[in-house]
Image: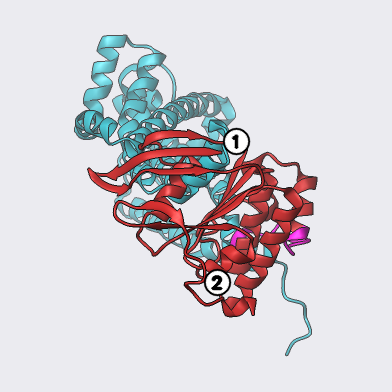
Amino acid sequence: MRLELAGKQFDGRPVLGPVTLELAPSQRVALLGPSGVGKTTLMRIIAGLDTRFQGTRQVPERLAMVFQEPNLLPWRTALQNITLPTGATPETARALLESVGLKGRDAAWPRQLSLGQQRRLALARAFAARPQILLMDEPFASLDADTAGRMLDLTARLLDDSGAGLVLVTHDPAEAAFLHAQPLRLRGNPATLGADDAGALPPHPRDI
Amino acid sequence: MSDRPPPAPAATARRSRWAALTPGLVSAALVLALWAALAAIGDDPRRLPSPMLVLGRLWALAASGELWFHTGMTLARVLAAFAVAMVAGGALGLWMGRSATADRWLNPMLVVLLNLPALVVIVLCYIWIGLNETAAILSVALNKIPVVAVLLREAGRALSPDLDDMARVFGMRPLARLRHVVLPQLAPAIAAAARSGIALIWKIVLVVEFLGRSNGVGFKLHMHFSNFDVARVLAWALAFVVVMLLIDLMILRPWQDSANRWRQDAA
């Protein structure tokens, strides 16, 4: 994947400056930075959801995304929430449901699942698309520490198994470290991308 | 604590449906009783015939086969106009809800159509297209299209951008997106448009038949109106009300219930 961004404006106000982001197969990077700096905007450009920018974007054929919210189809069952968007077979979907700890919940409606379960379903859906690069936009925000820890474990395992690359948007350097993602920091206005000054923050209690 | 098992959900649903129907049935019976009382007091069957007299006429119409032919013709027109109005109005409304440009250009026409009297549309269709089936069905559909479009426009504006993003990232095909992402979000608006629509449409179909068709319930009403035959007018009206109630109870409501299955709470 290669993104060469010359700039991005909202109503004439520059948000992102020149940004170049290149990802080799299976490479993992994390985009860090305070809220409002433009991390999600950059993510939407990478995902192809925002095409109004100056620059070029080359992405592999199969992308998948885990959003801030689970973004499930409430009127389709857990199994259909995997098969319909991704085209995965029911067998693949069942295997993935099992690997995220939702074995036997094929027929459950999303609103019958807890928030943690809904997020794991969203994770299963993303891997069902057999992504070459997985995009994750603050996927562990708004989860309690326990649930977030289990989601991180699960994500690490699925990433290792599938060999997918990763672009993770987060404000927590510990999440990036746990997933072995190279930390990059968005800063400035308009924001540009630079290496993270490692060690500036103490390690997250979860990792001790 | 009772050791009887709780009733199955289906049985509960059936019972609550009957419980919900009871007030309706009782009030219908009261109206019938009032009608019978007024007819007995007035004692003028040409002005207000008794329910028994009307039922007798209805029976005779059913026995002769006339009832089935004319209600069948009317029903066919209702369904054709309904289908055209739902598809055209739905597509138009969805387009206007999604595109601000389309909304700005089409809104004036929508406002004109909404405020044009049904009768004007019918007369103009008959004059411009001719006294034929196309004109009849088109004029009814034109009366209903703006109402459907307004309802679906509001629903189209409220479509979830998050689910739209999800469908785009995963590259869902347009048809799959329509079926699994968009239409379920529109279902409440579609159900509202369908139920209000079918009621409006059959009333307009009768006017269309009254003015320019040689069969159907509206045509029969025209004939009996010319002869001041109130008993037969009421018999036809009653027959068609029953048909429309059956459509609501047997088709629209079950469809709405099954479309709402995912809202249930029990795990």
Residue occupying the far bottom of the picture: B1
Chain seen in red: A
The quadrant where residue B28 appears = bottom left
Q: CA distance from mark 2 to mark 1?
A: 30 Å
Indicate which label's residue lies in the foreground, 2 or 1. Answer: 1
Determine crowd level at label 2: few under 14, some 14-19, many 20+ residues with C-alpha closer than 10 A: some
Q: Nearer the viewer, residue B154 or A125?
A: A125
Main SS of residues in magenta: loop
Residue B60 percent across, percent down from the top left: 53, 32
Chain letter of disc 2 in the image: A
Q: Position of residue B21 (x, y in %)?
A: 52, 60
Residue A105 covered by magenta stretch:
yes
Please give left or right for residue B52 compared with residue A128 in the image: left
Spot occupied by residue A141 in the image (x, y as percentages of width and height)? 51, 67
Asked whether residue B191 is in view, the answer is no
Residue B63: x, y in percent? 59, 30
Mark number displayed over residue A60: 1
Write down the chain letter for disc 1: A
Q: State which tag comes first along the sequence, 2 or 1.
A: 1
Magenta residues (range)? A98-111
Q: Residue at x 40, y 28 (%)?
A: B88
Give the left or right position of residue B22, taking residue B159 as reference.
right
* Image height of A20 relative to B261, above or below: above
| Residue A143, disc | 2
| Nearest the eye: A148 or B178 | A148
The amino acid marked with disc number 1 is Pro
Image colour assigned to chain B = cyan
- A29 sits left or right of B203 in the view: right
